[in-house]
Amino acid sequence: MDIEEQVGTGAGRDGMRAIVGAPGEAVIALDFDGTLAPIVADPSAARAHPGVVGVLRELAPVVGAVVVVTGRPAGLAVEYGGLEQVPGLVVLGHYGAERWEGGVVTAPGVDPGVERARAALPGALARAGAPEGTWVEDKGRSVAVHTRRTAAPEEALELLRAPVGELAAECGLVVEPGRLVLELRPPGVDKGAALTGFLRERAARSVLYAGDDLGDVAAFAAVEKLREEGLKGVLVCAGAVGDAPVRELAERADVVVAGPEGVVELLGALGERIREFGGR
């Protein structure tokens, strides 16, 4: 892959050149589900693409940092991805509310609104007429309502959007929509804030961020804002094979690739380009 040919914008090409030219000042930031791991009906069955660990192990020693930013609990992302094998990796779980680093997870206490929502959701879904196959995923620091297993997933999602939103408001939470999922979580916690904080912590001069879903819009917006402040950035939309990428991400991305396989290919090409440039 000629990596520069994959980048469709001037800002993205500037970002890629900055990463290749000064990799020690760069951060490689990645979503997990849909970006490193294929989307599956049961989130507990998600596992990283077989090429992920290898390509990250090659990149990690030559860039400033590799970070995974996910809505999952940080420890689960590490377990499901085999990511403990990546040297120096940081995982920001629960949209940045948790941090895994060096095998240790640090986090504040659970928002009491999540506890209230967890208890109230079964009744709220029953009153809303949630169809068979609707299920609730308890993430510990958030709860998510999935409709992927229902007979008509999109229709079920629309049916539940308003009642789930009302419950979230009553509990002091916000709703983060995604592909066939509505997640209730504390306000002020999103991938944009998590990514911005990490980039500032590492004094990064450039970043590549890859994501595939609506939860990644905040991270895209953060990179766009930081570009205005001088950061060089590359935005990657990981559209799943056979499934159109989220339109808002695709329209804002510098690069669109085909799911986790495309992400692995892109990162592999980036690593090769960094090694070639360093050998000059």
Image (cartoon, rainbow, N blue to C red):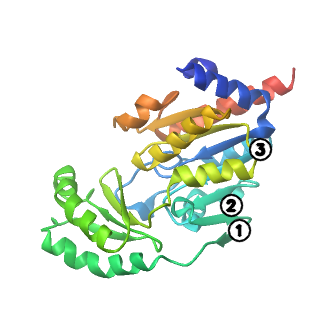
Q: Position of residue 19 (x, y in %)?
A: 72, 31
Separation (CA) of disc 2 from disc 1: 7 Å
Q: Residue at x 43, y 36 (%)?
A: 249
**Mark 3 or mark 1, earlier in chain:** 3
Q: Are marks 2 and 1 in contact (CB under 8 Å)?
A: yes
Instruction: Classify mark 2: helix, strand or loop.
Output: helix
User: With 237 as the anchor, is 103 left or right in this view?
Assistant: right
Instruction: Classify mark 3: helix, strand or loop.
Output: loop
Q: Residue at x 18, y 57 (%)?
A: 156
Question: In the displayed structure, would residue 179 be above or below residue 229?
Answer: below
> How packed is label 2: few (under 14 Cα within 10 Å), some, or many (20 or more)?
some
Instruction: Check disc 3 and report the residue beneath it.
Output: 64
User: With 53 as the anchor, is 69 left or right in this view?
Assistant: left
Q: Choose mark 3 or mark 1, whichever is in front.
A: 3
Q: Quadrant of the C terminus?
A: top right
Q: Position of residue 79 (x, y in %)?
A: 58, 64
Q: Position of residue 22 (x, y in %)?
A: 79, 32
User: With 149 as the anchor, is 39 left or right in this view?
Assistant: right
Q: Are marks 3 and 1 in contact (CB under 8 Å)?
A: no
Q: Quadrant of the N terminus?
A: top right
Separation (CA) of disc 3 from disc 1: 19 Å
> How packed is label 1: few (under 14 Cα within 10 Å), some, or many (20 or more)?
few
**Mark 2 or mark 3, earlier in chain:** 3
Question: In the displayed structure, would residue 22 be above or below residue 182?
Answer: above
**Mark 2 or mark 1, earlier in chain:** 2
Instruction: Check disc 1 and report the residue beneath it.
Output: 103
Q: Residue at x 68, y 57 (%)?
A: 90
- Residue type, label 1: Gly
Instruction: Check disc 2 and report the residue beneath it.
Output: 84
